Image (tube, rainbow, N blue to C red):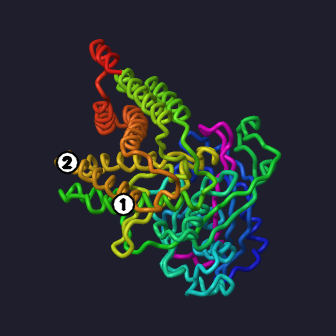
């Protein structure tokens, strides 16, 4: 779909105040718009003009500044838009993509739903070497006319980004439009690209990506909404940064969302052990590939750092949840036991699991299962509203493992498993797959392997940490679900060795 220079009249129409007003009215219902934000304060930072297609549809990409979020600084959102002038043939666009019908009869649409934007994105993207887009050519041979965007379909259910299914591009692909932009390279592009270059096939291969520069000092396009105090507009910061704005990746054939798949197994009373075991092996392979791809980030764990961070989160959870407060003494005792084991490991020279690049937000919903290709891991972006440095900070792989274990408990509950054995079996199988791969020679890629007992204790600590976060969330939002994470908290705490009595201490002293 060739793009031409925009007609002056459509450029002027897109600059009219009612366009920004229509976008402001439309934003609050978007799942990627922060619930704490005030849409009336939205201002336009910049606009990239993508031109018009052969039907006269004019595509642009607006960067919008949003104040009033829970973060300390304003948020920058990417909003592609397409204007279909009155009297031009409308594209066959899903009704969900309509932003507004303007006063002159023009249609303003979310670009993610419109072939004019998608085609322009594909034409301007940076393509991975040898990605084989548009029928198998090398990246140097791509022709925009070859991009067939018929059948494009925006997926539902996402919150932080927008994913567009493109069945006829690159043999089937998925375009993710990143909505909340942050300075720096997006890990959901950098990490899969690094993993595929390492030869690991457990992630959808990135085919192409886009970047933009953001000028923090530029605020254009209408300023505060009518009647709004100008002082409430976002603060302009005089600096420029670059960021990724989208990625096109391999489409996993006949893929099922891992959480939905597990819930179906639980609902039907089918054991999930075999898929869980395969997933455990895949996660272990992912950690191994991450250690190779980001070797400079691999180093010994600092037990003090780990425990201090967990203590802070326990105090925060106890302040927010009555259920946590009632267990805080047991939780503190567990962490002190872990501290003692860590100190003993250091004294004895036992290696602990290393700090490395990890997924950081791993659960069943971040995995796809394909009958042809098995498990694929997705969404290395982390929480978009957190600073990039936090989202890419090296950590222990056990954090990912614990996140997946918690997900099995939720799948059991949501799917309505008739016995707690469903989740226990899935958890056991996942751990068998994970630890089994780690026993393969060379899988670790570093020194001596940590002891299994130390790994189990650290994994339990991470699961406790995750479950405490879930308790706070459920107590605030879904009180009827609080038993799901509380059962995990109690399960971990029940494994704590009984405290020594005075008689035990005496026997220990005499035997020393």
x 76%, y 40%: residue:
235
Whether tag 1 and tag 2 are in contact, CB under 8 A, the answer is no
The image quadrant where one finds the C terminus is top left
Question: Along the line of sight, which residue is nearer the eye, 272 or 278?
Answer: 278
Q: Can the viewer see residue 480 in this picture?
A: no
**Position of residue 462 measured from the top left corner of the image (x, y, whole percent):** 42, 40
Q: Give the side of residue 349 with respect to residue 50, left or right.
A: left
Question: Along the line of sight, which residue is nearer the eye, 117 or 489?
Answer: 489
Q: How many marks?
A: 2
Secondary structure of the residue carrying numbered label 1: helix
Q: Mark 1 points at which residue?
A: 279
x 35%, y 45%: residue:
406
Label number found at residue 350:
none
Question: Along the line of sight, which residue is nearer the eye, 250 or 310?
Answer: 310
Question: Does residue 8 lie above or below 135 as drawn?
Answer: above
Q: Mark 2 points at which residue?
A: 421
Span highlighted in magenta in the image:
65-92
Q: Give the side of residue 347 with respect to residue 505, left or right.
A: right
Classify mark 1: residues with Cα within 10 Å, few (<14), some (14-19) or many (20+): many
Distance in Å between CA atoms under marks 1 and 2 = 19 Å
The image quadrant where one finds the N terminus is bottom right
**Position of residue 73 measured from the top left corner of the image (x, y, whole percent):** 68, 40
Within the magenta stretch, is there residue 77?
A: yes
**Position of residue 96 measured from the top left corner of the image (x, y, whole percent):** 49, 63
């Amino acid at each position: 779909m060739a793009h031409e220079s925009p007609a002056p009249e459509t450029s002027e129409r897109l600059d009219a105040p009612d366009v920004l007003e229509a976008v402001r009215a439309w934003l609050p219902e978007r799942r990627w718009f922060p619930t704490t934000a005030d849409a009336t304060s939205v201002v336009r930072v910049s606009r990239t003009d993508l031109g018009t297609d052969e039907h006269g549809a004019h595509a642009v990409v607006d960067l919008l500044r949003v104040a009033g979020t829970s973060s300390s600084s304003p948020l920058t959102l990417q909003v592609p838009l397409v204007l279909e002038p009155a009297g031009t043939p409308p594209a066959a666009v899903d009704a969900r993509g309509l932003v507004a019908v303007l006063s002159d009869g023009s249609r303003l649409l979310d670009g993610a739903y419109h072939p004019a934007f998608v085609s322009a994105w594909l034409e301007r993207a940076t393509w991975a070497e040898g990605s084989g887009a548009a029928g198998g050519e090398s990246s140097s041979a791509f022709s925009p006319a070859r991009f067939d965007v018929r059948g494009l379909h925006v997926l539902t259910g996402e919150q932080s980004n927008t994913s567009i299914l493109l069945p006829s591009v690159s043999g089937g692909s998925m375009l993710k439009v990143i909505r909340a932009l942050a300075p720096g390279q997006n890990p959901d592009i950098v990490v899969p690209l690094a993993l595929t270059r390492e030869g690991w096939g457990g992630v959808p291969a990135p085919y192409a990506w886009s970047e933009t520069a953001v000028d923090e000092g530029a605020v254009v396009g209408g300023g505060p909404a009518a009647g709004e105090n100008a002082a409430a507009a976002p603060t302009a910061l005089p600096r420029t940064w670059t960021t990724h704005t989208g990625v096109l990746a391999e489409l996993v054939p006949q893929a099922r969302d891992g959480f939905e798949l597990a819930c179906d197994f639980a609902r039907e009373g089918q054991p999930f052990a075999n898929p869980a075991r395969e997933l455990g092996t895949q996660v272990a392979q992912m950690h191994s590939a991450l250690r190779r791809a980001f070797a400079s980030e691999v180093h010994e764990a600092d037990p003090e750092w780990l425990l201090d961070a967990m203590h802070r989160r326990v105090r925060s959870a106890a302040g927010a949840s009555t259920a946590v407060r009632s267990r805080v003494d047991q939780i503190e005792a567990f962490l002190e036991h872990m501290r003692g084991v860590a100190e003993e490991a250091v004294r004895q020279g036992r290696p602990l699991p290393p700090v490395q690049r990890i997924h950081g937000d791993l659960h069943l919903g971040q995995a796809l299962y394909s009958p042809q290709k098995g498990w694929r891991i997705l969404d290395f972006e982390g929480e978009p509203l957190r600073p990039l440095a936090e989202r890419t900070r090296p950590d222990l792989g056990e954090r990912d493992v614990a996140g997946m274990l918690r997900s099995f408990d939720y799948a059991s509950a949501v799917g309505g498993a008739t016995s707690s054995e469903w989740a226990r079996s899935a958890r056991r199988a996942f751990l068998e797959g994970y630890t089994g791969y780690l026993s393969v020679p060379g899988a670790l890629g570093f020194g001596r392997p940590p002891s299994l007992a130390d790994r189990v204790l650290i994994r339990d600590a991470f699961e406790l940490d995750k479950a405490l976060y879930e308790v706070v969330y459920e107590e605030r939002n879904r009180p009827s679900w609080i038993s799901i994470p509380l059962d995990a908290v109690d399960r971990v705490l029940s494994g704590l060795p009984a405290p020594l009595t005075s008689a035990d201490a005496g026997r220990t002293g005499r035997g020393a």
